[in-house]
Amino acid sequence: MKNFVEELRWRNMLHDMTPNTEELFAKGPVKGYIGFDPTADSLGIGNMVQVMTLTHFQRTGNSPIALVGGATGMVGDPSGKSAERNLLDVELLNHNLDCQKKQLEKFLDFEGKNAAQIVNNYDWFKELGFLDFIRDVGKHVSVNYMMAKDSVKNRLESGMSFTEFSYQLIQGYDFYYLWKHYGCDIQMGGSDQWGNITTGTELVRRLEGGEVSALTTPLIKKADGTKFGKTEGGNIWLDRNRTSPYRFYQFLLNTADADIGNYARVFSLMGQEEILALEAEHAIAPNLRKMQKVLAEELTARVHSSDDAKKAIDASEVLFGKATSESLKALDEETILDVFEGVPQAKVSKSSIESGAGIVEILAEKTGFLNSNGEARRALKENSISVNKNKVGDGFELSTDDLIDGKYILLQRGKKNYFLIIAE
């Protein structure tokens, strides 16, 4: 059985831990938890760091608990925030919780002796009155202690409501409750959560003299210092309706060489020897982007499905590789529109395709891809025109057999000039 702390250490996933942590794991399997903030109806790829922490925690024989914050989500975590969060209404919060639960269920094993659990902290806070909480819990933590936390100190100038100031107490009580009722001995999270987590260790000690552990992982940043998981188009989400499998795959495929070694350690299930071998191979021929391709395929398959990963690979080959007509025709509409976003397009009537539209007419008059029939004929004579990746000549006629997903046809001149026909 692998040691969890050592597993995190070689994966560059260990930032800080309380002094008693390694001793705790030396005694045998441990039950531990990580909390997830329901601010959106999907987890982002940045949350995968904590998903992977729980995954490695379980794979090394321990029992993971994923906590979804039905109660803490009503308050808002100030950690890492420069301004007050907008509070969510209950209906939206519950929707977000349900969506995140379904995503978390894909990554953990809920059967066996170290089965995972998903809990909602609203289940114990809904019965706890405000006066009871400030009397029985609040009196054990001084204001000076709470003010010393970075999440509070960083907001003193801009201001912080009592709601957000109290967040660390609520999270701390979560740890106490899970320790007392679930036998949970360690809380884990990102390095920005250290203050909130150690408030929990203090509460366990002060309320009942118990001893628990805390462990944090580094916040993942790109080599250039920018935030991981952010693009010009916004966040990279795990929900396919927010970020399609193709875009998810492309995000990982475009990882800089300076980052890919670290990302592989954090997000892959590959072992140390496998990753080191891949790094050596990548160093010899970085232009082949072998590490990026391996990680992009693995993570897309785990977040979405193996079929989605294959489609994303095939779709990438359309613009950047050696796609065939068959692989092109296997793409669905969602992927086609993602791949060809920004590529010139034109609509033609499906009836003209059904009646056998001549390629010269399609290239010029029907779509404007080329400027004239004469230019179209010259291009065809030069053998530079392809329909769905197949070279065609002057006498070629389009038919419904050429429609991708019953609607699209890809025209191409040379290697880089694409045009998408939409038949309606």
Image (tube, rainbow, N blue to C red):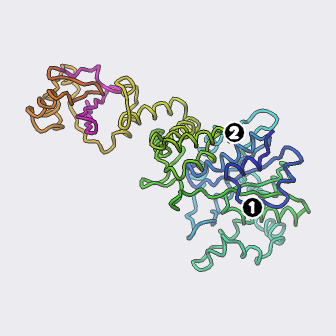
Number of residues whose C-alpha sits closer than 10 Å to that of mark 2, classed few (under 14), some (14–19) or many (20 or more)? many
Residue at 53% x, 44% y: name it: 283
In this view, the residue in front, 317 or 120, is: 317
Dot 1 and dot 2 residues touching (CB under 8 Å): no
Magenta span has 95? no
Considering every residue shown, the one lying at the far front of the view is: 284
Residue at 64% x, 65% y: name it: 79
Magenta region, residue range: 396-424
User: What is the distance, in whole Å, between disc 1 and disc 2 at their CAs?
Assistant: 22 Å
Considering every residue shown, the one lying at the far left of the view is: 374
Please state if 70 lies on the left or on the right of 245 as rendered: right
Disc 1 element: helix
Residue at 18% x, 37% y: name it: 369
Residue 336 drawn at (x, y percent): 37, 35
First along the sequence among labels 1 and 2: 2
Please state if 14 lies on the left or on the right of 422 as rendered: right
Residue 326, placed above or below residue 266: above
Residue 252, placed above or below residue 84: above
Number of marks in the rendered image? 2
- Residue 88 appears in which quarter of the rendering? bottom right
Quarter containing the N terminus = top right
Q: Which mark is residue 319?
A: none
- Residue pointed to by mark 2: 108
Residue 402 drawn at (x, y percent): 28, 23
In this view, the residue in front, 42 or 215, is: 215
- Residue pointed to by mark 1: 197
Amino acid at the residue labelled 2: Leu
- Residue 326 appears in which quarter of the rendering? top left
Considering every residue shown, the one lying at the far right of the view is: 209
In this view, the residue in front, 371 or 199, is: 371
Amino acid at the residue labelled 1: Ile
Disc 2 element: loop
